[in-house]
Image (spheres, rainbow, N blue to C red):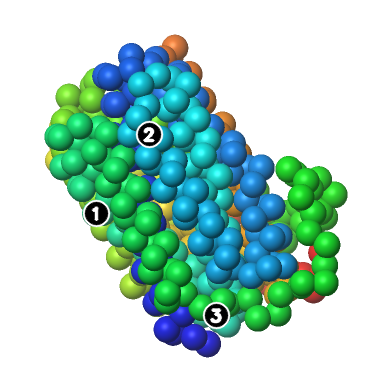
Amino acid sequence: MKNKASLSIIFVTVFIDLMGFGILIPILPTFASKNLNISDFGIGAIVAIYSLIQFFFNPILGRLSDRIGRRPVILVTQLITASSYLMFSFSNSFLILFLSRMLAGFGGSNIGVAQAYIADITSKEERSKGMGIIGAAFGLGFVFGPLIGALLSKYGYHVAGYGSATFTLLAFSFALFMLPESNLNKKSDTKITLKLFDLSYTKKVIAHPSLGFLIILFFIIIFSMANIYGTFAILGYKVYHFSDQQTGMLFGISGIFGALIQGGLMKILTIKFGNRNLVLAGSFFMMIGLGFLPYGHNFLGVAIVISILSIGTGILQPTILSMISRYSPEHEQGSVLGINQSFSAFARVLGPLWGGFAYDFFGYQFPFLTGAAFTFFTFLLAFFLLNEKRLIEVKNV
């Protein structure tokens, strides 16, 4: 690693930030259902708007960070995220909750910037492990966040919102004093494009055979997983009759496995098996996990299945992210990773919308079976088309 200290600092920053995010995710659907009487499809829309905003703003923030640096973008978006959690605490209608998630989506559009930060301070050989650090921060955030959220929700859902805001402000304070700038080759002489969606640049990225294929793979994986974002908590609440605490524990179990894979094992797995084999294995585990979630029968069964799912996602996401970064131009890491995050955000829009619709009109099994089917398609694409020897590094987009 070029800068182990910076890697540790960005890990802590993202971890604390994601812990605030993790507090709300397990309780958001049940809060909307029980307290605001919002339909399952409406819950899907609330989950989806977060990602729709990211679809538009991920590339903008990525390009902005290429020009002015990663640090200021991360700091400002953390303040915006904290304000969205405070708005959640005062939500008493669909509209207020919807607006709070819109604001959170804008603040959460900094993940591509954090990934670009990792790319700045890691060599291409170490990038899988570096991207795994972001995944581990997500995983640990989902270990502690949901458990804290379940505990705080006993005192009222608004208290959980205050908790999320507090952790995000802690992450802001830590980054303000400890996080150095990583983008030392800022393109300050380049005009920043403030289009909501830069179609011409996106076309160039997607048209490249290597980057386009990898971004499409990542899109399908995220869509498959996003089918359950709004429906998993509802499945636990309505079908398995889990409490908020039990749902929080399941998210925590998922986070533990994700953190173990992405934080500690990615470098070893990459060296031993190679990226192609990891994509195949991750797709297989993810397919099994998604397909069996509605058939877990009880807490133990669901815990086992979600562990298998977490192993799959823990392998897949950092592997493909590192490949996208590896085959992207060094001076356009923020832009390319921002576009990838934009496409994955769009997958997180479509997934919850379809998941909520399928849950409402076809039955509770369908969001999970849809995810399993699309993950199987990912497996087939990787098996027949993914060949690292044919992937071409991009010098300029």
Residue 63 in view here: yes
Mark 3 is surrounded, within 10 Å at the Cα level, by few (under 14), some (14 to 19) or many (20 or more) other residues, namely many
Residue lying farthest bottom?
Answer: 2
- Label for residue 144? 1
Q: SS of the residue at dot 1?
A: helix
Which image quarter: residue 134? bottom left
Residue 384 in view in this figure: no
Please state which of the two labelled residues, at mark 3 or mark 2, is closer to the viewer.
2
Q: Nearer the viewer, residue 45 or 308?
A: 45
> Which comes sooner in the sequence, label 1 or label 2?
2
Residue under the image location 37 percent in, 56 percent down? 169
Question: Which residue is identified by label 2?
Answer: 88
Q: x, y (%) of residue 261?
A: 35, 64
Residue 370 horizontal side relative to residue 304, left or right: right
Q: Tell me the crowding category of disc 1: few under 14, some 14 to 19, or many 20 or more residues within 10 angstroms, Cα based.
A: many
In the displayed structure, does residue 107 sit left or right of residue 306? Answer: right
Q: Which mark is residue 365?
A: none
The type of residue carrying mark 1 is Phe
Nearer the observer: mark 1 or 2; the answer is 2
Q: Which residue is mark 3?
A: 122
